[in-house]
Image (cartoon, coloured by chain):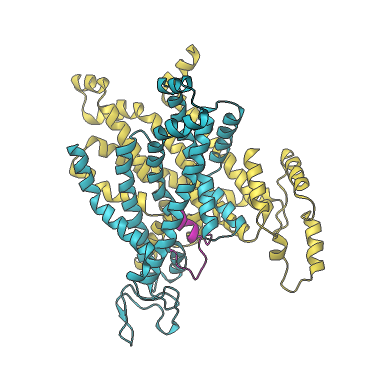
Chain colours: A cyan, B yellow
């Protein structure tokens, strides 16, 4: 118990960082009064700390269209967070359900589900994501759906494996003898055994999804301009590397600290819930 | 087969390539003619069947945009990606395993703590951030290395480091974990009792035993490098398959995209297969177990 508390204390700062991001995503207005999409060509590429004539301070400078970088970062948190969390939720739900079904009913449909999972896993994930986002058209919903659907086999594998071991245990046999139907068994007895492992995997996956979302935005397949997203800020920023480093440096930092805190929280959750997940 | 089915349908969801191919002043009739020539006016299932017929003959079709066999285009670009991926693999395997071994041997000492920032960066920064930071430092500030293009060895350095940054961290961690596990085994104690020093024990005994999970991961990471190449090649304008993928997608060049994804997936599977073969070479016990079973 004591070592557990020590671990909790160690990740506490990361929880704080993480909740700042959550807050920024939910109510960006409290962090920045400026519009993230308001352009002003008169003040383009101004260095961090720039003070406009009206006395407005641009803490992190302005971008190539004179927009406030700080506001764009704050509003960009919304995209990053919603895509990563929603897609993880989606893939955990799909993968978890299919995995449980495949593991419990070990018949043709179960085998089929796991075969399809194998096929998905044999296409390099990032390529699959690029392909489908490009096909469906890049926007917030499609991004979530694609990342969610492309990632389900990982959850299905975990759920499948866990269900196989759970379903063979004596207490399940006892419930079957008592006359419980498969629906009740799966929902009331198998699922609670499996959920911790799925959550453990999900916390690890959130960090990965943040990076994947940023990467997709970077190659132009994420949220479309002028809506701010960290990845697409970098796409623009790379053209001004020699004149304006702040265009690229700050989005990188934003991604880094979010991914860092999510990773530490994920490690903590994994240790607490299921130490066996990769 | 499963792969190509997914790829085929995903692509045909994406709307009309013809509209992107014709000049803006083309008439509807021009577009119909082009659509007919490309066979896009036929029902989807017929296109699907035909796609498989051609595939079985090794014919992946013609590029809509460049109007030549897609395999020729891939053959042109693939060597660049191979060069990049091999360089990145070399960098990540050497540094990743080195860091992992050092961390395991000097567990809890200051040397281990020194590497922590690198590992965190590898885990939490996307490759394009690493790439852009490297360009900032080495191309813009120091002017040592070119930031784009593929001319000579010098232009390979930054892209390969960028691509390698993806896998160094995970390789180091897996190496460390397995080394630590092995260092507690009895054979290590025996070797120590016989008077062997730490370097000798690590190099001759522990690495070989810790090898299997590391090889598995190297195989997986090789496959990831192929995916990561898309982003890296975009940053550095490296003329490989990754850049080609993005160009093909933007031009709605179905046959080319299909071919690339199939091609990369086949390589992905081949790499995984080779990894399995490597097990037997590294660990003779695996072969013996199979024979007796």
Residue drawn where x is 35% and y is 27% of the image: B208
Q: Position of residue B179 (x, y in %)?
A: 30, 32
Q: Residue furthest bottom?
A: A53
- Return the residue nearer the eye: A101 or B191: A101
- The image quadrant where one finds the N terminus of chain A is top left
Residue B155 in view: no
Q: Residue furthest front?
A: A179
Q: Position of residue B86 (x, y in %)?
A: 47, 45
Q: Residue furthest top?
A: B292
For residue B58, side relative to residue A236 (left or right): right
Residue drawn where x is 31% and y is 56% of the image: A18
Q: Is residue A98 magenta?
A: no
Magenta segment boundaries in residue numbering: A211-229
Number of marks drawn: 0
Residue A199 vertical placement versus B278 (above, below): below
Residue B104 in view: yes
Residue B84 vertical placement versus A201 (above, below): below
Residue B196 vertical placement versus B81 (above, below): above
Residue B206 vertical placement versus B8 (above, below): above
Q: Position of residue A185 (x, y in %)?
A: 47, 29
- The image quadrant where one finds the C terminus of chain A is top left
Q: Position of residue A37 (x, y in %)?
A: 45, 74
For residue B180, side relative to residue A201 (left or right): left
């Amino acid at each position: 118990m004591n070592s557990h508390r020590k671990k909790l204390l160690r990740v506490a700062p990361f929880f704080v960082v993480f909740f700042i991001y959550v807050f920024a995503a939910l109510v960006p207005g409290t962090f920045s009064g400026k519009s993230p999409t308001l352009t002003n060509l008169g003040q383009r590429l101004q260095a961090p700390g720039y003070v406009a004539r009206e006395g407005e301070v641009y803490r992190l400078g302005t971008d190539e269209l004179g927009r406030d970088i700080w506001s764009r970062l704050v509003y960009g948190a919304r995209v990053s967070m919603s895509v990563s969390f929603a897609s993880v939720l989606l893939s955990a739900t799909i993968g978890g359900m299919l995995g449980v079904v495949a593991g419990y009913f070990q018949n043709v449909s179960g085998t089929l589900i796991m075969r399809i999972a194998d096929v998905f896993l044999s296409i390099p994930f990032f390529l699959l994501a690029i392909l489908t986002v490009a096909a469906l058209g890049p926007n917030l919903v499609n991004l979530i759906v694609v990342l969610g659907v492309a990632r389900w086999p990982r959850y299905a594998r975990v759920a499948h494996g866990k269900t196989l071991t759970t379903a063979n245990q004596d207490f399940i046999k006892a419930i079957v003898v008592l006359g419980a139907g498969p629906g009740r068994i799966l929902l009331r007895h198998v699922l609670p055994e499996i959920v911790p492992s799925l959550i453990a995997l999900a916390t690890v996956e959130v960090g990965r999804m943040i990076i994947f979302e940023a990467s997709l935005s970077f190659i132009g397949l994420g949220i479309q301009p002028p809506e701010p997203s960290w990845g697409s800020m970098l796409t623009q920023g790379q053209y001004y590397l020699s004149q304006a480093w702040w265009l690229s440096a700050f989005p990188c930092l934003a991604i880094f600290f979010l991914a860092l805190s999510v990773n530490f929280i994920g490690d903590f959750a994994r240790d607490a819930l299921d130490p066996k997940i990769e | 087969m499963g792969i190509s089915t997914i790829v085929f349908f995903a692509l045909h969801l994406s709307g009309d390539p013809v509209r992107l191919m014709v000049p803006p002043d083309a008439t509807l009739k021009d577009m119909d003619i082009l659509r007919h020539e490309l066979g896009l006016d036929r029902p989807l299932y017929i296109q699907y069947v035909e796609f498989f017929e051609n595939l079985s003959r090794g014919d992946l079709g013609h590029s809509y945009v460049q109007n030549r066999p897609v395999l020729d285009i891939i053959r042109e670009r693939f060597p660049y990606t191979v060069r990049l991926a091999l360089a990145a693999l070399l960098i990540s395997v050497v540094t990743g395993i080195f860091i992992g071994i050092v961390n395991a041997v000097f567990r809890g000492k200051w040397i281990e703590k020194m590497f922590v920032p690198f590992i965190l960066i590898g885990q939490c920064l996307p490759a394009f951030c690493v790439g852009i930071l490297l360009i900032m430092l080495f191309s813009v500030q120091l002017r040592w290395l070119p930031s784009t293009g593929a001319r000579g060895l010098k232009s390979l350095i930054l892209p390969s480091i960028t691509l390698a940054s993806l896998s160094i961290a995970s390789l180091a961690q897996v190496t460390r974990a397995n080394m630590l596990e092995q260092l507690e085994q009895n054979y290590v104690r025996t070797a120590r009792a016989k008077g062997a020093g730490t370097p000798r024990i690590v190099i001759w005994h522990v690495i070989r035993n810790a090898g299997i999970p590391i090889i598995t991961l190297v195989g997986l990471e090789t496959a990831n490098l192929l995916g990561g190449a898309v982003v890296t090649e975009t940053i550095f304008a490296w003329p490989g398959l990754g850049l080609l993928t993005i160009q093909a997608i933007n031009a709605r060049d179905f046959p080319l995209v299909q071919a690339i994804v199939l091609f990369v997936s086949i390589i992905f599977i081949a790499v995984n297969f080779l990894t399995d073969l490597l097990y037997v070479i590294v660990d003779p016990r695996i072969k013996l177990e199979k024979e007796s079973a």
